[in-house]
Amino acid sequence: MTLRMTNPYYLLPEAGAIPVALEKAVSESGMPLSTLAIAAMRASQINRGSACLWAEVNLARKEGITEDQLATVAAWRDSPFFDDAERAALAFAEAVTEMAHSGGDLVSDELWDTLSRHYDERQRAALILWLAGGTMFNIVNNVVREEAGQVWDNGVL
């Protein structure tokens, strides 16, 4: 795969403030970074975003996600390695990501209530913004054909 162009975040340095601000906000939300990482991994799998998936796997390892969990994120429903809170976040990640692909509200009241039992409003806000930002980064990286393994020098997790 050949890179089509320099990543827009380098071409428009002011835009580089977006991922830095997002990382700062979510890291102060009380939402476990490990949960954000596996939720974003699942979204990147759906979005076919290898660059972001690679980065999220590294974050997940850094935050203590086990190799068993990493190996079964795509099949989390059938995996014994996730707790109820992580399952709620993974289900939410799938619903939000599918919503971005198909439109409509795929976040059912039942799913929202389950998520709300495990995470407070600030934590849910962090998850929503992290997933929305991740989808944006998946789009950018997929369009320019950013390869997995790229280490960005913008200070993001």
Image (cartoon, rainbow, N blue to C red):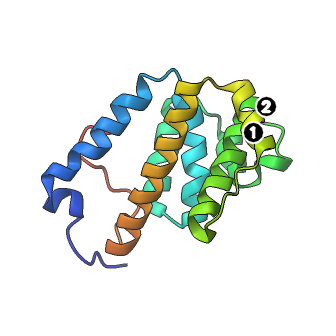
Residue 83 visible (yes or no): no
- In this orientation, which residue lies closer to the viewer: 3 or 67? 3
114 in relation to 117, above or below: below
Asked if 98 appears above or below 2 in the picture, the reply is above
Residue at the spot x=61%, y=23% of the render?
120
Q: Secondary structure at mark 2?
A: helix
Task: Say whether residue 154 is left or right of residue 80.
Answer: left
Q: Residue 54: where, in percent of width, then height?
A: 47, 53
Look at mark 1 in the image and give the residue it sits on. 87
The amino acid beneath tag 1 is Arg
Can you say which quadrant of the picture contains the N terminus?
Answer: bottom left
**Looking at the picture, how far across and down is residue 140, in whole percent?**
35, 65
Q: Quadrant of residue 144?
A: bottom left
- Quick check: marks 2 and 1 in contact, CB under 8 Å? yes
Count of marks overlaid on the render: 2
Identify which residue is drawn at 28% across, 45% down. Answer: 18
Is residue 6 among what the camera can see?
yes
> Where residue 44 sits in the image (x, y, percent)?
54, 58
Q: Which mark is residue 84?
A: 2
Q: Quadrant of residue 26?
A: top left
| Marker disc for residue 40 | none
- The Cα–Cα distance between marks 2 and 1, rounded to whole angstroms, is 5 Å
